Amino acid sequence: MPVYRDQNGRIIDSPTQQASNPLEQPTQVVRGSTPKPAQATPASPLDAATTVNRPGVTPAAPLAGQHVDTPTSRTPQGQVPPAASPSDGDPKTRVFRPGRATTAAPVSTGEAQPAAAAATAEQSSDAMADPLAGWLVITGGPGMGNALRLGYGVNAIGRDADQRIVLDFGDDQISRKQHALVTYDPKGRKFYLQHGGGTNLVYMNEAPVLTPTELTAGVELIIGATELRFMPLCGPDFDWQEKA
């Protein structure tokens, strides 16, 4: 005959007898047999991975090695996730706008444009209005290495900007106006040097110039603390009048 006991081990008459505690349920004990432990129902794989979102409650961090299935990581069965766009994050991609064409560089046809031709003709005309006759090259003192342009007729030398030959490289011994005059005579095709009336003198080959003196190619001049070499272009062998 089976014996019935409650959860506290007390013998009861039948399984239907109520225990002193309403929550206590009787346990059937069968003599000669070992009670089998209750088997836990295996949890669904999604139960541990699913997080319930409750307002105001921060979800706990997943355990190490545990995969958390998020809405963005779920892909319906049988569907392939979309591939990333190749233009994402590409800073070199240009956005096409209808109606806007890329301006291409002009292709040279080998023919001069009207504006360029006019500018070239104007420059040529200006150059021949005051053609080059020779140079004064600074060989010593302030401004060494510079070349000063000589034109037809009288070339006044001074530090002021209105002088035909501006010799203003920091030599304060040079007069502001007409320290010296270099003249080219196109009829005789000769150059002359003369003093301009300033306080300081002009020297040619270390000799003071007190009267107009003819210049020859390569002669050395001294004006203030500046040394110059005379280099003619025009002369007995060449003059721009021959090209006119």
Image (spheres, rainbow, N blue to C red):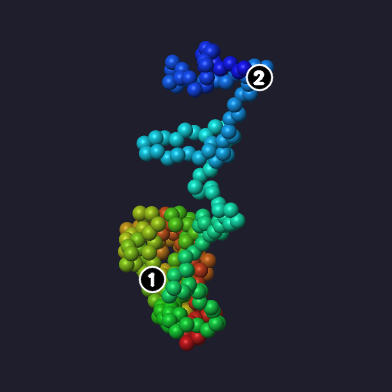
Disc on res. 34: 2
Name of the residue lying farthest toward the right: 32
Give the alpha-carbon distance from disc 2 to disc 1, as whole Å.
Answer: 134 Å
Report the amino acid beneath label 2.
Thr
Residue 33: x and y in percent read 67, 19
- Looking at the image, is 36 positioned above or below residue 145? above
Element type where label 1 sits in the image: strand
- Looking at the image, is 242 positioned above or below residue 230? below
Q: Residue under label 1, please give it.
A: 155
Element type where label 2 sits in the image: loop
Q: Which of marks 2 and 1 is in front?
A: 2
Residue 118: x and y in percent read 43, 83
Which residue is at the front of the view, 219 or 23? 23
Residue at left 40%, top 38%? Answer: 54
Residue at left 52%, top 19%? Answer: 14
Name of the residue lying farthest toward the front: 1
